[in-house]
Amino acid sequence: MTTAISAHGLVKHFGATVALDGLDLEVRAGEVHGFLGPNGAGKSTTIRVLLGMLRADAGEVRMLGGEPWHDATALHRRLAYVPGEVSLWPTLTGGEVIDLLSRLRGGVDRARRDALLERFDLDPTKKNRSYSKGNRQKVALVAALASDAELLLLDEPTSGLDPLMEAVFQDCIREAKAEGRTVLLSSHILAEAEALSDRVSIIRAGKVVQSGTLSELRHLTRTTVMVETERPADDLASVPGVAHIDHVDGRVRFDVDTDHLDEAMDYLATLRVRSLVSHPPTLEELFLRHFGEVVEEPVA
Amino acid sequence: MSGLVGTLSLVRFVLRRDRIRLPVWLLAIIGITYASAAAVASTYDSPAEIASYGNNIGSSPAGIAMGGPPVALDTQGGILVYETALTAFIGVALLAAFTVVRHTRAEEEAGRTELLVSTVVGRHAGAAASVLVALAASAVVGLGVTGSVLSAGMPDQAAWLYGAAVAAFGAVFAAVGAVAAQLMSHGRTATGLVLAVLGGAFALRAVGDVQESFLSWLSPMGWSQQVRVMDDNRWWPLGLSVLLVALLAVATGLLAVHRDVGSGIVPARPGPATAAGWLASPVALAWRLQRGTLVGWAAGMFLLGLMFGSFSQEMEQMVADNPTLAQYFEATGGNITDTLFATSLLFNGLGAAAFAVGSALRVRHEESRATLDLVMASGVSRTRALLEPLLVTVLGALVVLLVGGAGTALAFVLTGGSSGDALALLGYSLVYLPGVLALAAGAVALIGLLPRMTLVVWAWLGVTFVVGWLGGLLDLPGWASGISPFEHLPLVPVEDLTWLPVGSLTLLAAALLAGGLVGFRRRDIMA
């Protein structure tokens, strides 16, 4: 499989702030790659380096066989970009913006555009200044998805979308993958990346701290369970993969590695479960658990 | 009146947020009035000069259309009102209406009103608070105007009446702003409605005053002028203004209960669902975004040229009668008509420069708003992203110069000039193009090389403006006035056309442009 994006040792300073601190990133052609990290980790900076908007202070980048800074224009014709904070020209309508951006790239696929407008339930006759954040995001998404770009660079594209539109977005990304397109999807929501990504890279403080397929990263994900059983769960500690057992008001809270969820459930079933709540780990919990001591705080 | 709960705390909030803006506006309006009043008092200080003003300006339709009915122009006080009223009226109206719109509709649009309405604040408190502040500001302007004309020697009663007339006009527009904010769903469209009403009020009384018809009585600006300061000194027309303010206040309250927070009575108009076929390049986008501004500047400069030119005959007569004015015009050299047209063309050039600088800076504006990212990420090179919009800047500046020059030339023909000379005037208007281009290229150089300091170019334009307007009076040292690119250009038609400064300024513009482009191609694109 060929490589769509490969970056090695990227460094970018803004004054005294270190935005990227030796970042490595590898995105394979045709995959959906989740780019995960908390706010301020350097996701947007990385994407803007890939776009050739920013010139890295050190390191190497190749994208679609070119170099983002020098071959910016040629590469831009082959990619589509959705910024995290979409701002548009207030006096233009959404439809005008979609057409303009499509034509700059080469042409409008009218049928595709209209189908996407329908799916995202977006009114193209509204002036941009009356759109909400989510609707401005939809304008940029429709423009990007209506193109035939082979690479989609999406910077937290769903931060303003409601759950229904989030589902539409996920369908669109799966279709893009089926068409053979490559997607770099930045997000600070683990569940979104899990739903879509073939592989993920986790970035913190300007460095990629973990990268691989989701099953490779499975050991990173632990589910938190809160359970109330008829008989006391005294032997819980002996179930493989269970940690952080805590007794609260007659209930038990514990974390379990997702790989061992089965065993934990089997054991609990023998105790007659009265109530059970579970939630997947948030990205923040994951960071705290796995990278808390390893990674230095970003220099302010 | 539970709808007004919290009004007083909101008044404090409005004052806190406008603690810089409001004093600046007040100082500007009062300062300009004070300066013009002082200038009028020193320029027209003999009975002969005052009589000449009354005979010439008072009988000119152009003068009446601009300044109002010729009331008591045979007195210094009458001239004071005539020369200062337009600025004061328009200034106070804009201040009052903008204050209200900014704190009601624009706030609501930004979503901040929801935050306030969710606390213990009545439905009408926001509108009431902003109107109260606007009324107070109008009163302060009125006091400032009274003080200015008192210090210029106007009798007490007339001065207080004049100040009250100005304040009353401000009050009317505070109320107009409040209604507009209820009707429209966007701050911008509400502001547009206010400007349309102001334009209508001006036009009604301009036509009415020239025709001496009832039309003046349909305009609030007419009421404020029909008090006839220094003549009848009557207060009752201001009663009409007070009545209108009360009616509009009630209308605001009624409109407010018939709509939801966040929406207007008039729904936002939908636009085209698809872009016009030509909207497919950075230059087309720049045209789409700037065409309205360009039309505005061109129309404004056309009218300014027309107005300047139409005074040529009255000016000749007045200068002949007034030694102070004669001295001023001698300082610039040449005969009065030529000087007048040279000044008109210089102002035309300054207008074109202001358009061009604003237009050139748009790339930086788009960059900081991140819309430039969208354009560039769609396959537009840095060179195209920077240079293509400048086509609109350069051609737009050319259009403003020519249209403004056409206004001046038309006035020249209308006042009896030959069409051949008029054509020459039109040509002369283009002499300022290299100066305009140098300023615009200065903006580009800053965008490329010092993007955080692009506002410096406004300072350059400001100096150019001050030197052009007041240069002769200020007696500036050569290096200081030399900062203005216009200072190096021949003051046509008073001075002969020389090509050296035209060529060197064009070269300077080219060098600045090249520097800006080199910088822009090398640097980070940043918000």
Image (cartoon, coloured by chain):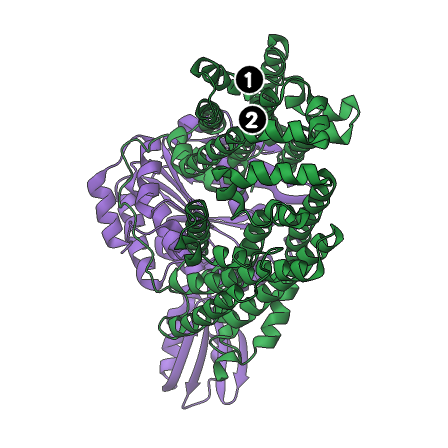
Report whether residue B414 is seen.
yes
Total marks placed: 2
Q: Is residue B111 visible?
A: no
Amino acid type of disc 1? Answer: Val
For numbered disc 2, what is the local secondary structure? helix
Dot 2 or dot 1, earlier in sequence: 2
Name the disc covering residue B431, or none: 1
Chain ID for label 1?
B
Question: Which image quadrant for residue B169?
Answer: bottom right
Picture coordinates of residue B77 (x, y %)? Answer: 66, 50
Residue at 46% over, 54% down: B191
- B171 with respect to B453 (left or right): left
Using the image as rendered, state which of residue B260 and residue B178 is in the foreground.
Answer: B178
**Colour seen for chain B:** green
Q: Is residue B400 above or below residue B63?
A: above
The residue at the point 72 percent across, 30 percent down is B323
Amino acid at dot 2 = Gly
The reply to whether callout 2 and callout 1 are in contact (CB within 8 Å) is yes
Output the chain of dot 2. B
The C terminus of chain B sits in image quarter: top right
Q: CA distance from mark 2 to mark 1?
A: 9 Å
Q: Residues within 10 Å of mark 1 (few under 14, many from 20)?
A: many
Q: Give the residue displayed 35% in from the left and 73% down from the top.
A: B258
Residue B498 position within the rendered picture, expressed as x and y whole percent measured from the top left: 61, 9
- State the mark number for residue B349: 2
Q: In purple, which chain?
A: A
Task: Judge the density around disc 2: few (<14), some (14-19), many (≥20) Cα neighbours within 10 Å.
Answer: many
* Residue B188 rendering spot, x and y as whole percentages: 44, 52
Quarter of the figure with residue B419: top left
User: Which of these two is toward me, A164 or B113?
Assistant: B113
